[in-house]
Amino acid sequence: MLSCHEVSKSFGTTQALAELSIQVNKGEIFGLVGPDGAGKTTFMRMVCNLIDADMGTITVGGLPASRYPRERLGYMPQRFSLYGDLTIAENISFFASLYSLDKNITRQRSEEMLRITGLTGFENRLADNLSGGMKQKLALTSALMTRPELMVLDEPTYGVDPESRKEFWQILYRLNESGITILISTPYMDEAELCHRVALINSGKLVACDSPLGLKNLFDRQVVEVRAGIIDPYFFDLCPGVVDSSYYSKRFHLLVEVNEQIFDTLQEYALHKGFADITLNYISPSMEDVFAFLAEPRLPKQPDVV
């Protein structure tokens, strides 16, 4: 459905993408995960033919992105871009008019999409008076009016409450089951787990790409969760057997070498530093662990204060 081959893009001296290659299959939900500035939005805008690549090629449905019919592609940018002083119904009608949809088709599809997104009954509410979740549903409804084959969603649930995020993903699954291919970027690791495949991007480069389970299976290490009243995020950095460490407020996820004695090593290390009461458990790596271990730059250990 979508092929990106060795695409590079720079803005002045800042390189947004560096020889990025990604393949999105027809009918899948494909996720992009990376920190701010990783290049996710730049890539999505290229897919939508809003900006050009400096090098490389992007094809959609076998055609160059610049020639792919715009009505077959739906796009939701990061920020709500519809009109706050128009009602839901007026925004949808305006969007449909941009694609020259006649009134009968607009009415039929509007009713269908409003039902799918749960906005039926709110047609006369001004967009400015909608919650964050409802604004995103309106944006999605508008983008679906042309019955696109590919939906490109740039962090559509950012800043939305957890319940609305859940409802939004239920809608995405229904759309995907109807045959729509979905390309979505997200800052939420739990959402990355809902994708069929995920690409981890950092500094414009592809770090890894696989199913969530496949990414987790990249580990040839084990993950140990440590719970203790420790507030130093670098506490375990010099512990023997610890390959990497992530800190989550009195809770650590440690990537450790496979070693039957690792619990004893960690307990002895903590005891030597004055912490006798720690709880250790093996855990399955989450997508957050995967991202932290594969993509996030490690901060240097801070010197001890004398």
Image (cartoon, helix red, strand yellow):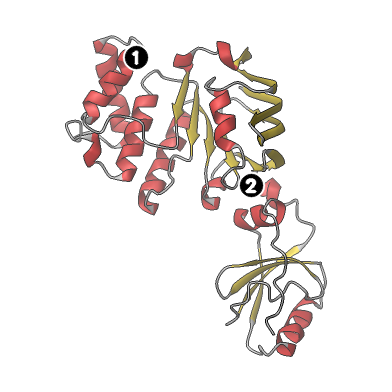
Rendered location of residue 15, percent (x, y):
67, 35
Quadrant of the image containing the C terminus? bottom right
- Left/right placement of residue 78 relative to residue 139 reads right
The vertical placement of 272 against 97, above or below, is below
For residue 212, the mark is 2
Rendered location of residue 232, percent (x, y):
63, 76
Q: Residue at the spot x=79%, y=81% of the render?
A: 265
Quadrant of the image containing the N terminus? top right
In the image, what residue type sits under mark 2?
Answer: Pro
Q: Residue at the spot x=54%, y=19% of the render?
A: 49
Label 1 vs 2, first from the N-terminus: 1
State the SS at label 2: helix
* Residue 98 falls in image quadrant: top left
Q: Is residue 28 visible?
A: no
For residue 98, the mark is 1
In the image, what residue type sits under mark 1?
Answer: Leu
For residue 21, the mark is none
Rendered location of residue 206, percent (x, y):
70, 39
